[in-house]
Image: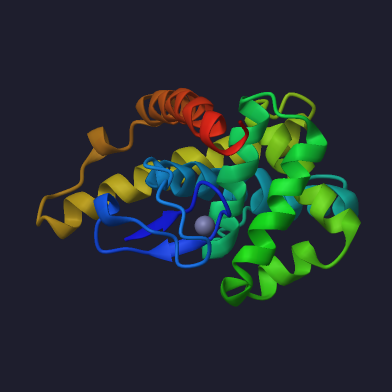
Amino acid sequence: MISICQKCLTLNETEQHSSFTCTICSEKNYIYISNNIYEIGNKAARYGYDYRIAYDNQIKEAGVIGVDYCLEATSEILKWLGGIIFSGVIGNAAYDLIKNKVQKFMAANREHIDNNALKISATNESIDEFISNIAEWANDLKNLNPEVKKHILEEQIVEKLTAKSEKKLSQGEIIDESDIDFRGAAREVEKERETNKKNARLIARKIYK
Ligand SMILES: [Zn+2]
């Protein structure tokens, strides 16, 4: 499994968490909820950044959203980064401190940086855009174009339903109308969001102390 060092933010491959020693700084404290950072960041980078940029661009170019996207999975490294930023925002860390952690994380994990992450870390503006989009996601997309917000929410619901159906199919079960429960999926998305915020508060105490 992969753990993240509490001190230098380097991603370490470890057999088990109990024997963690950072390969870079020898720190013994890992972030024991590192799975949560990854999960929180996955959602934040996918919906708060990837989909948001795609739909924002569509509005800019066409004035309306006429095409629904189905985007590829987000880069691994951006999931971790998204989780670090989301936690900082939820933990009320100052912007400069969050940005400092972003730069620290990118520098510490240079070998994992792919083209998507490279594009984001290329300029001061692109880093700021990534941070502010994740921050807006953490703040429930309050300032977003309502059309874009609606589409992002729909993507989440559809992906939740798809994942459920795929799981059932893989277990040899049959899918029927009762599986297409949009309201139920919307409630789950909402619940997940609250859980992510709760976990982010705990993570923030470790990273942003
Ligand atoms: Zn370390």
Q: Quadrant of the C terminus?
A: top right
Q: Is residue 73 left or right of residue 122?
A: left
Residue 24 visible in this rendered orientation of the protein: yes
Tell me what residue is drawn at x 54 percent, y 53 percent: 80
Q: Is residue 111 above or below residue 132?
A: below
90, 30: nearer the viewer: 30
Furthest-front residue in view? 26
**Residue closest to the eye, 99 or 74:** 99
Image x and y of residue 173, in percent: 11, 51
- Residue 134, compared with residue 109, is above or below; it is above
- From the viewer's side, name the closer residue of 30 and 163: 30
Q: Residue at x 26, y 38 (%)?
A: 179
Identify the image's colour scheme: rainbow, by chain, secondary structure or one colour.
rainbow
> Does residue 65 show up?
no
What residue is shown at x 38% (from left), y 28% (from top)?
A: 188
Q: Specify the farthest residue to the left.
A: 172
In this view, 176 is above or below 119: above
The x, y position of residue 131, in whole percent, is 75, 45
Query: Looking at the picture, how far across and down is residue 205, in whole percent?
Result: 54, 28
Q: How many marks?
A: 0
Q: Quadrant of the N terminus?
A: bottom left
72 up-or-down from 3: above or below? below
Picture coordinates of residue 118, whole percent (x, y): 73, 71
User: On the picture, is 150 further left or further right than 59?
Assistant: left
Which residue appears at 59% of the width and 76% of the height?
Answer: 111
